[in-house]
Image (cartoon, rainbow, N blue to C red):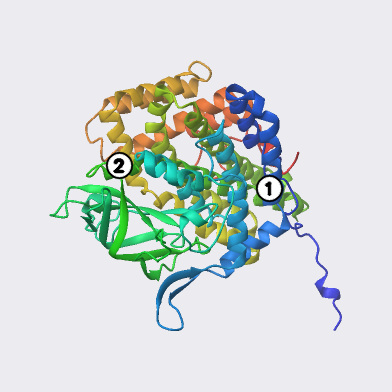
Amino acid sequence: MAATTHTVTNQAPPLVGHDVYGTDRALREGVERHLSAAAPELLGAVREELHELGRAAGSAQAQRWGALANENPPELRTHDRYGNRIDEVEFHPAWHRLLGHAVGAGLTDAWGRPAGHLRRAAGFFVWSQAEAGHGCPVSMTHAAVPALRADPELAAEWEPLLTSHVYEQGLRPPGRKAGVLFGMGMTEKQGGSDVRANTTAAKPLDAAGEYLLTGHKWFCSAPMSDGFLVLAQASPSGRDDLTCFLVPRVLPDGTRNVFAVQRLKDKLGNRSNASAEVEFDGTWARRVGEEGRGVRTIIGMVAATRLDCVLGSAAQMRQALTQAVHHAEHRSAFGARLIEQPLMRNVLADLALESEAATTLALRLAAAYDADTEQERAFLRIAVPAAKYWVTKRCTPMVAEALECLGGNGYVEESGLPRLLRESPLNSIWEGSGNVQALDVLRALQREPMALNAFLREVGLARGADHRLDSAIKGLLTELADLEGIEARARRVVERMALVLQGSLLVRWAPPEVADAFCASRLGGDWGAAFGTLPHSLHLGALVERARIAG
């Protein structure tokens, strides 16, 4: 049969073979800015490692791994052929390749090396664009370190394995592995975010710090990890004594700990990653931190994973933007390339603005972790939940708009954008949904005056540079001074805080056309309710050009 009617024209070529780091101006400039201030001697080495990771993330091979890991989701095997309980989850080989590359690139190693958080955050941002699901165990492994440091003995035993650059799959005693992964189990079906409603009980053993756990966890991600930090009640009554515990999958003598995986969740997205319901029934655990101080012990892990939610969403936004711009560059309609048409240019510029604001904010938070001063710790106390609330909320509408830029092509699975859209709500839910973040910011405002002072000092660094930013800061202060109905207004307050912070960062560091567009639209109110409604008088072409895949 003749194929003359099937000549392929006017289609964008595959977006492969590019350097995800090197072609992202906002990311590259942000890394160099913070690194130049904190550790300029590392610039050369960090550039090299991020360019190498960027080329790997943009390769056809990595994209294929991502597709395969999602097309072949993990499968639960509760028993072996003889009827023995094994509770294992089998993953496609592509999952292990993605995970191995992430660990090998140091994405679980931030706490002990110079500028570790910044370089690790940039790497997480880059490699997440290859595939997002495997970032869950990477994030939890990285974030377990501050919680374990509540017990120096446990930290000495586990931290070298958690920060290792060697990935070893399979369940074995940790002492016989060169590197391990960690998970976390906090939520239970009757409580969700209200972890103080947990009913999992911890019974002390004769040996100091050892307990047996009985109970369940409604969400436990990456159940094939080597260890988990979980919360359980350590009081006889089973209430009001929430404590943090380390639960290993395999005990030192090689026997399996009691860790019954009841089922895997059938999720909207994040298909490559296993999320499980697990039961403890005489499960051996080691206490981490003081009894009754579980939330305080694990809060360092929660804060670190919240930052990864910001990074992960910012990475998805950049990935979606890249696809939209690439398509518009190569697709023609009505006599011109899409990227040259004024209305499409407005949409792309608006998406680029949202992406750059998210990226700039995420890197600022990572740099604050590296500085580790009292001022920066106070800043993070408010900035992390505020950023987590806003950036993760903006991810889904932005990905949906980017998908629409491709029209019907974007709605087809082969484009990769449907997978990205299904993934996009996750970070807004994980580690506390929007209301939890907003209320956490209110809690910090009410109890930790240093946190508000640090936040206001940060945004005040740009005061006087743009009248719209100055007006937004004034409006925010008025909002914060009014305590009436503050809880019902919490989302509104936190949204304003996040926007003012993004505006301050962009006014100080971004090109003038980016800062001007952000202040005009997000702070000045010259903007519609959908993307693509920027004032036509702005330098829209410059914003789109900055977002292009170019060196």
* Residue type at the position of mark 2: Gly
Quadrant of the snapshot with the N terminus: bottom right
**Residue 26 location in percent, x, y?**
63, 35
* CA separation in Å, label 2 and label 1: 49 Å
Whichever of labels 2 and 1 marks the residue nearer the N terminus, that label is 2
Q: Which mark is residue 289?
A: 2
Residue at 35% across, 26% down: 451
**Residue 257 location in percent, x, y?**
36, 64
**Residue 52 location in percent, x, y?**
71, 44
Question: Are circles 2 and 1 on residues that touch, CB within 8 Å?
Answer: no
| Whether residue 442 is situated above or below residue 306 in the rendered picture | above
**Horizontal placement of 439 versus 26: left or right?**
left
Q: Which residue is mark 1?
A: 325
Between 26 and 384, the one lying in front of the other is 384
SS at badge 2: loop
| Whether residue 292 is situated above or below residue 456 in the rendered picture | below
- Among all residues in the image, which is located at the extreme left? 237
**Horizontal placement of 538 versus 162: left or right?**
right
Which quadrant of the view contains residue 8? bottom right
Residue at 46% across, 43% down: 159
Between 378 and 213, the one lying in front of the other is 213
* Residue type at the position of mark 1: Val
**Residue 109 location in percent, x, y?**
54, 42
Residue 529: in sight, yes or no?
A: no
Which quadrant of the view contains residue 99? bottom right
Quadrant of the snapshot with the C terminus: top right
